[in-house]
Amino acid sequence: MISIIIPVFNEETGIVRLLDHLKNTSLFPNNEIIIVDGGSKDKTPEIVKNYSDIVFVSSEKGRAKQMNAGAQIAKFDVLYFLHADSLPPPSFDQLILNEIKRDKHAGCFQMKFDMDHWWLNLMGWFTKFNHKACRGGDQSLFITKSLFKEMGGYNETFVVYEDNEFIGKLYKKKAFAVIPAFITTSARKYEEIGIWKLQLYFANIYLKRLRGASPEELHQYYKRRINP
């Protein structure tokens, strides 16, 4: 069994869909689901608390902080970090445990968007390659608790880019697997901002980090361009 850790902030429109999806697609009914709320102002907490079998906790806002908080209370030896707008494939828990049995202690799924556009389809196609440039948080992340602790968890100085920073460290250890099954993630940001604009902004964040930009510089750019 695995501990599924989901950081949320104002996710009332999609959280029920995700929770029902997890229950309908997992093979092991006793998986632990931990929702870590970063101070939602909508009905997210109220909705989640209606599920008696789901752990709900609050933390400071910030995905790195929220995911670390969830990991601290997780009771199982395999952690699965999942964004609130991403739906894992059927039998995702069994697929993850299969990789653990093959001595793969961290990894993700291939990804596709819920919007049919040739560029987004191409981006999804690239996620089949096991290279850090093809990775992102929307692909989710499974990792053994022991390896997570060894890596020191997510770097909480990163308000954005925390997934890429952590996964980059995993690649340096050559400890990463890509499961050939698709997680489906929302293209809502692409619809809101525009595919080409948002892709340019993400590319700039990636290049800024390669050139040594600080976590705060990345955050300020993200606030100006993507989430003002």
Image: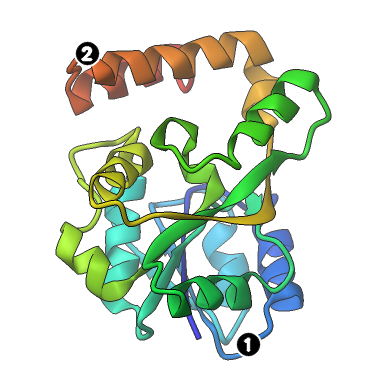
Q: Residues within 10 Å of mark 1 (few under 14, many from 20)?
A: some
Give the structural element (helix, strand or loop) at label 2.
Answer: loop
Q: Residue 85 carries which label?
A: none
Mark 2: amino acid: Arg
Q: Which of marks 2 and 1 is nearer the N terminus?
A: 1
Q: Which residue sits at x=38%, y=52%?
A: 38
- Residue drawn at x 29%, y 14% is 208
Q: Is the residue under label 1 in contact with that under label 2 (CB below 8 Å)?
A: no
Give the labeled residue for mark 2: 211
As helix, strand or loop, the secondary structure at mark 1 comes to: loop
Where does residue 5 sit, x and y in percent of width and height? 45, 66
Which mark, by number, is residue 28?
1
Relative to 97, say whether 46 is above or below.
above
Name the image quarter holding the C terminus: top left
Q: Residues within 10 Å of mark 2 (few under 14, many from 20)?
A: few
What's the distance in space between the residues labelled 2 and 1, CA to CA?
Answer: 44 Å
Q: What residue type is labelled 1?
A: Phe
Which quarter of the figure has residue 75? bottom left
> x, y (%) of residue 83?
53, 51
Residue 165, x across and y down, in percent: 28, 38
